[in-house]
Image (tube, grey):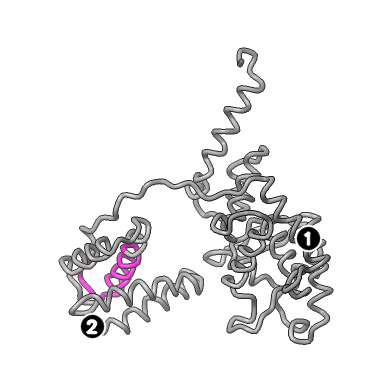
Amino acid sequence: MNSRTAIEAFLEMMSAERGASANTLDAYRRDLEEAHGDMTGGLADADASAIHTYLGAVAARGFAPSTQARKLSALRQFFRFLYAEGLRTDDPTGTASAPRRTASLPKILSEAETGRLLDLAAAEAANPPPGIAPAAAVRLHALVETLYATGLRVSELVALPISVALRDDRFFMVRGKGGKQRMVPLTDGARGAMSAWLDTRATSKSTADSAFLFPAASASGYLPRQAFARELKALAARAGIAPSKISPHVIRHAFASHLLQNGADLRAVQQLLGHADISTTQIYTHVLEERLVRLVNDHHPLAD
């Protein structure tokens, strides 16, 4: 069996039938092609022994348990696809076990730190510091305000259509993982930052005609998420926040955590984040526990 042909068929199925995003497909491709390259007889014809040897080598290289589990998950889905298509009569990953993963809490910015970041982005949009183009400062302000207001995934944020800003509504629909749509809110601050960015992007022919809110001269036609991440870290450094502490995903975590700290329901946060399963949202359970302890201490008649 030709392994590369099998990998392409698997990726095509994941795209067409399961609506996997480009980022997800890229991750599957990397993991499967890496496994194929490490196996003497190729991936598609690998037996259980070859799978165990490969997973042992992955562990020996020092990969984190989460990375090892992701690689095993890719292999499992690939071989289940081959079995379902009648290309194999067995699943060699059946006896493989994922490494135990320790639960880790997400990095979170405090409300004060987030406020400092947003205030600086707004100040720089109004008066760009030396070395930063005025249009870039206005765009960064719109990006940060919108990210914190909505809790979008960074891939969803950078690919927003311009229609989101043109409508100037308090809510808009976004298509997330698996092609599922959900409604997300917009604060007045985010709407104002978007409006300022619309005025700025309209002054340049290279951006004015784009269908994307944050256009760029890239293969996708919109701002690469890596470019936004770099600008965000630089903004954090200027705000006195360690760049290692921040990323677009950390802002998404801040959105969820701050909502829960201020009384939001976990199910509502699940819907806003676009999590298919409540168990994914339960990484924020520690926030709820802190809130409940504070509630009892502040309001119980026997509390000290």
Q: Is residue 75 magenta?
A: yes
Q: Which mark is residue 181?
A: none
Numbered mark located on residue 1 in the image: 2
Q: Nearer the viewer, residue 248 or 18?
A: 248
Say what secondary structure mark 2 lies in: loop
The amino acid sitting under disc 2 is Met
Check the image and name the residue furthest to the bottom.
Answer: 205
Please tell me whether residue 64 belongs to the stretch shown in magenta.
Answer: no
Tell me if 91 is positioned left or right of 246 in this view.
left
Split into 4 quadrants, where in the image is the C terminus?
top right
| Quarter-of-image position of residue 230 | bottom right
Judge from the rendering whether residue 80 lies leftward or rightward of residue 108; answer left or right.
Answer: left
Picture coordinates of residue 33 (x, y %)?
Answer: 33, 77
- For marks 1 and 2, the one nearer the N-term is 2
**Magenta part, dominant SS:** helix
Position above or below: 182 against 221: above
Q: Is residue 202 above or below residue 137?
A: below
Q: In the picture, residue 222 is in which quadrant?
A: bottom right
Find the distance from the CA under tag 1 to the CA under tag 2: 57 Å
Decide which of 109, 133 is in the foreground and name it. Answer: 133
* SS label for mark 1: helix
Q: Position of residue 210 (x, y in %)?
A: 72, 82
Magenta region: which residues? Answer: 72-92
* Residue 71 percent coordinates (x, y): 33, 65
Is residue 142 left or right of 292 when viewed as pictured?
right
Q: Residue furthest front?
A: 130
Residue labelled with disc 1 = 122
